[in-house]
């Protein structure tokens, strides 16, 4: 069999999706595939590019690895852009001089950032926002900068402005049009978005035309605007839209649109029947689709055609839901109401900062479009009405009004046809999900793995869960959130039982409300609940058997069976004498020493029997346990604030000390991390923490429910300009409400995402005392604070507890299996082959 030679030019998200789809089909064996990529790395996720500034790495954003292409049997040329297409001889030549013949050619060249031809735009401090290399350059330039300006107030421009804020700069957005996100939002939605973004500290300049960029004394830039206005800045990022990357096609003589773009038909073929174009370089029906989902649709259709199936691309949904600088924004269909006979229904709540507008047909039966700013809770439901032509209820305005008696019924998953698109990123329909569940996938995770639904932008996550749950129920399978088989209750229900009935032990709870003996799931969860409510030592006899390994020994077990010791260093502040003691202890016990990302010193390599001795020496020097082993408060990171820093506006160190000393020892469903920054430059990275505090001229801004980890999430701005007393009161209430209502091992970020009403509801509970429980929450926290004990100190003063820290019962000899070797002047665990080599006789 002679294989067809297939070349793909471009390895962005759409190009990668094409290859991924082809690789999943048996027909891939019909093709000899070559890929030319201009960038030095394989495809990565540009949709979440801004998260690169929030801690995600290039590897985190990668969509595939070089080995993956090799496994597929595809030849990948990185850092080797295609430079010419010889259509007559069907040969593609690359920058390196490589010439490759083709039978079929896929152009997935994407787009490039449009930079307005403003005099001075070539300056070295002017950047675009497109690739990881662009972001690296912006990051480097920001190190000596104070002010940054983004030219462009569209979706990408606001993403770039958020990135500048992430880097600690004073951010400005300059937009030529009269409003922000003019493509997606109407005038009302754009106006509210502007006010919300300005409330977050980004200055917006609309109806502003830049006429000149010039360097002034000191190396700064000055932007001159029409109307004799100007703005001084340290760097400029252009994000004023995109243009299709069609130079190759133009040089090859393919048909282009008047304003660029490679003309394609419904089969994604260009004017040359052997060449296809997909993604942002393609022009269909005189329109460039600038979102990833339509590009994915083009890619899938083209794969189908190459494999001998019928497929056509006629249009794509451009609806989008996102969060910009913490502001929820949604746009569906004809957001501007341009269709003939269109009618609008608008809801505005200026006090809450919410704007919702529905566009219906003249009879009010069909949803043509919608705009949502400040609250996108109705997005999924409205999108399904729009995509599937579902007739609107008799009073359609109830779909966007606040819930009240007589409100329109929620459009449940059961009301959707099987053809309804649930995940537009991966073109997964409700029918696909139902078939997957009926085929044996019995959990949300299994369905995601099988269909890829909700693994793109994630906007369909809630609806996907509803469909999976409904289908499992329809099959007679139980859908529940029980803690485990021994407790037919949720964690929240168990917390309530323990609190109301004042249950003090696991055995008592099991006798009253459980069955069996308990397991590794319910024991730690109940142990955490008991500790949160009654704050007794985890080694007290009724509790010690509930703890996992780390809590059992109050230290983190490492891979070779040794332990790490992390003393608390509140706020990262430490005296020279205490630093000396840490060094002395590490030297005495030959411990590997590392400064952690949370401003603590971690001492690795302690044997079990050494732990009480090490703790004793640290306690004598004034240290206490840092709870690095527990699901509890870990650290409160801090910058030096107004005490030392010339930018600081509040004493962040004192506040960090106060916060850490107040909440140390609080047991919770998951670990908790906090940070306090002394100004908006955010050196303590407070917005990536469960509780983040950032100083303002008038007090403190409070951010909640952020985290790092496998799925990083930016914290949400909860309240602004708080005084010290109010700040602590809100944190007290928030933490105890989280401890009371979260599921087992649920981080604050996931808890908030699953909380009905989200951040607004949380404000109602914490600030407005909607549930009437704030006094109770504060009293619970006061009890935790008042009963704090250093668990290390309690343990070393209790002979019974000390018995737990013996390596062997019948000998004092250390465990010979724990072996270290020296590396970079410090001990590290020996690998298996090194242990064998050490044990061999000379």
Image (cartoon, rainbow, N blue to C red):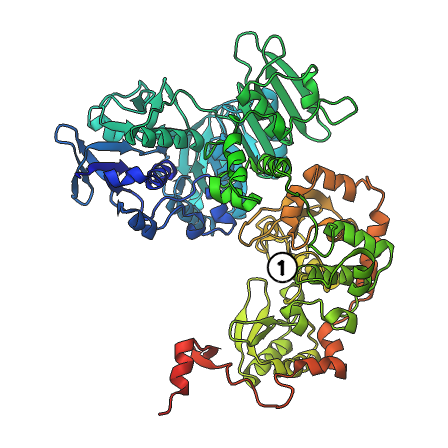
Rendered view: 574 above or below 373 = below
Residue 667 position, x and y percent, is: 72, 61
The correct choice, above or below, for 615 with respect to 31 in the image is: below
Q: Residue furthest left?
A: 89
1 lies left or right of 744: left
Kindly tell me whether residue 192 is visible in this rendering.
Answer: no
Mark 1, Cα crowd under 10 Å, few <14 / some 14-19 / many 20+, is: many
Q: Residue 76, position in %: x, y?
A: 27, 46
Image-quadrant location for residue 541: bottom right
Q: Is residue 240 left or right of residue 812?
A: left
Who's the residue at 40% across and 79% down the image? 834
What is the quadrant of the C terminus in the image?
bottom left
Which element carries disc 1, helix, strand or loop?
strand
Task: Identify the residue shown where x is 38% and y is 88%.
Answer: 840
Q: Is residue 239 visible?
A: yes
Q: 582 above or below 19?
A: below
Question: How many tags in the picture?
Answer: 1
- Asked whether 611 or 601 is in front, the reply is 611
x and y percent of residue 410 in the render?
A: 68, 27
Closest to the observer, 493 or 572? 493
* Between 294 and 547, the one nearer to me in the picture: 547
Instruction: Kindly identify the residue that appears in the image at 51 percent across and 30 percent down.
Output: 431
Quarter of the figure that contains the N terminus: top left
Q: Is residue 766 left or right of residue 608?
A: right
Q: Which residue is mark 1?
A: 638
| Residue 230 point in image, percent of width and height | 49, 32
Q: Among all residues in the image, which is located at the extreme bottom?
A: 842
Extreme residue toward the front, this view: 476
């Amino acid at each position: 069999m002679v294989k067809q030679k297939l070349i793909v030019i471009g390895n962005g998200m759409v190009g990668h999706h094409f290859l991924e789809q082809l690789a999943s089909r048996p027909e891939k064996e019909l093709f000899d595939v070559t890929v030319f990529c201009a960038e030095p790395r394989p495809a990565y996720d540009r949709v979440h590019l801004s998260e690169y500034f929030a801690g995600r790495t290039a590897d985190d954003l990668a969509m595939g690895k070089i080995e993956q292409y090799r496994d597929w049997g595809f030849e990948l040329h990185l850092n080797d852009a295609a430079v010419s297409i010889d259509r007559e001889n069907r040969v593609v030549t690359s920058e390196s001089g490589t010439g490759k013949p083709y039978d079929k050619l896929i152009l997935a060249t994407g787009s490039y950032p449009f930079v307005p031809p403003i005099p001075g735009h070539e300056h070295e401090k002017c950047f675009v926002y497109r690739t990881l290399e662009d972001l690296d350059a912006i990051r480097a330039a920001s190190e000596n900068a104070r002010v940054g300006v983004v030219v462009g107030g569209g979706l990408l421009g606001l993403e770039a402005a958020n990135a500048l804020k992430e880097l600690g700069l004073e951010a400005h957005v300059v937009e030529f049009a009269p409003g922000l996100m003019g493509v997606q939002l109407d005038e009302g939605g754009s106006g509210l978005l502007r006010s919300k973004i300005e409330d977050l500290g980004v200055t917006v300049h609309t109806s502003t035309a830049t006429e000149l960029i010039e360097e002034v004394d000191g190396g700064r830039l000055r932007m001159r605007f029409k109307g004799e206005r100007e703005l001084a800045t340290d760097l400029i990022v252009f994000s004023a839209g995109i243009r299709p990357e069609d130079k190759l096609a133009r040089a090859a003589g393919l048909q282009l649109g008047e304003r660029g773009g490679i003309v394609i038909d419904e089969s994604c073929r260009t004017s040359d029947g052997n060449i296809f174009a997909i993604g942002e370089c393609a022009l269909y029906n005189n329109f460039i689709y600038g979102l990833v989902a339509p590009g994915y649709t083009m890619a899938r259709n083209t794969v189908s055609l190459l494999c001998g199936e019928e497929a056509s691309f006629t249009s794509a949904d451009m609806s989008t839901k996102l969060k910009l600088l913490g502001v929820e924004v949604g746009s569906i269909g004809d957001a501007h109401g341009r269709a003939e006979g269109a009618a609008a229904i608008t809801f505005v709540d200026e006090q809450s900062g919410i704007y919702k507008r529905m566009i219906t047909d003249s009879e009010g039966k069909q949803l043509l479009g919608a705009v949502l700013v400040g609250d996108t809770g109705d997005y999924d439901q409205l999108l399904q009405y729009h995509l599937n032509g579902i007739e609107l209820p008799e009073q359609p305005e109830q779909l966007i009004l606040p819930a009240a008696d007589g409100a329109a019924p929620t459009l449940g998953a059961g009301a959707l046809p099987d053809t309804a698109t649930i995940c537009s990123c991966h073109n997964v329909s409700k029918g696909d999900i139902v078939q997957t569940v009926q085929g044996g996938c019995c959990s949300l995770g299994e369905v995601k793995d099988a269909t890829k639904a909700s693994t793109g932008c994630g906007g369909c996550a809630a609806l996907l869960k509803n469909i999976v749950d409904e289908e499992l129920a329809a099959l007679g399978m139980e859908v529940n959130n029980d803690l485990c088989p021994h407790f037919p209750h949720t964690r929240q229900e168990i917390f309530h039982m323990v609190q109301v009935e004042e249950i003090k032990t696991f055995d008592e709870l099991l006798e009253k409300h459980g069955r069996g003996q308990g397991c590794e799931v319910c024991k730690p969860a109940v142990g955490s609940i008991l500790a949160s409510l009654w704050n007794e030592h985890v080694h007290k006899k009724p509790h010690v058997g509930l703890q996992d390994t780390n809590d059992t020994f109050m230290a983190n077990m490492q891979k070779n069976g040794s332990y790490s010791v992390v003393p608390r260093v509140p706020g990262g502040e430490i005296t020279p004498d205490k630093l000396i003691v840490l060094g002395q202890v590490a030297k005495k016990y030959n411990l590997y020493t590392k400064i952690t990302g949370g401003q603590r010193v971690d001492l690795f390599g302690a044997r079990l029997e050494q732990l009480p001795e090490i703790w004793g020496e640290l306690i004598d020097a004034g240290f206490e346990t840092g709870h690095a082993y527990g699901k509890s408060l870990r650290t409160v990171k801090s910058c030096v604030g107004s005490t030392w820093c010339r930018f600081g506006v509040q004493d962040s160190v004192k506040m960090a000390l106060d916060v850490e000393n107040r909440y140390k020892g609080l047991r919770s469903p998951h670990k908790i991390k906090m940070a306090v920054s002394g100004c908006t430059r955010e050196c303590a990275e407070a917005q990536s923490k469960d509780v983040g505090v950032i100083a303002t001229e008038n007090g403190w801004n409070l951010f909640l429910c952020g985290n790092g980890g496998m799925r990083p999430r930016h914290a949400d701005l909860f309240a602004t300009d708080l005084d010290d007393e109010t700040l602590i009161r809100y944190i007290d209430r928030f933490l105890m409400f989280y401890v009371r209502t979260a599921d087992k091992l649920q981080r604050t970020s996931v808890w908030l995402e699953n909380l009905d009403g989200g951040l607004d509801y949380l404000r109602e509970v914490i600030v407005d005392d909607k549930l009437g429980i704030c006094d109770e929450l504060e009293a619970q926290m006061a009890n935790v604070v008042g009963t704090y004990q250093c668990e290390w100190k309690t343990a070393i003063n209790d002979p019974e507890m000390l018995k737990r820290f013996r390596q062997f019962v019948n000998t004092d000899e250390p465990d010979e299996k724990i072996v270290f070797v020296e590396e970079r002047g410090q001990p590290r665990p020996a690998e298996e082959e090194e242990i064998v080599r050490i044990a061999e006789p000379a």
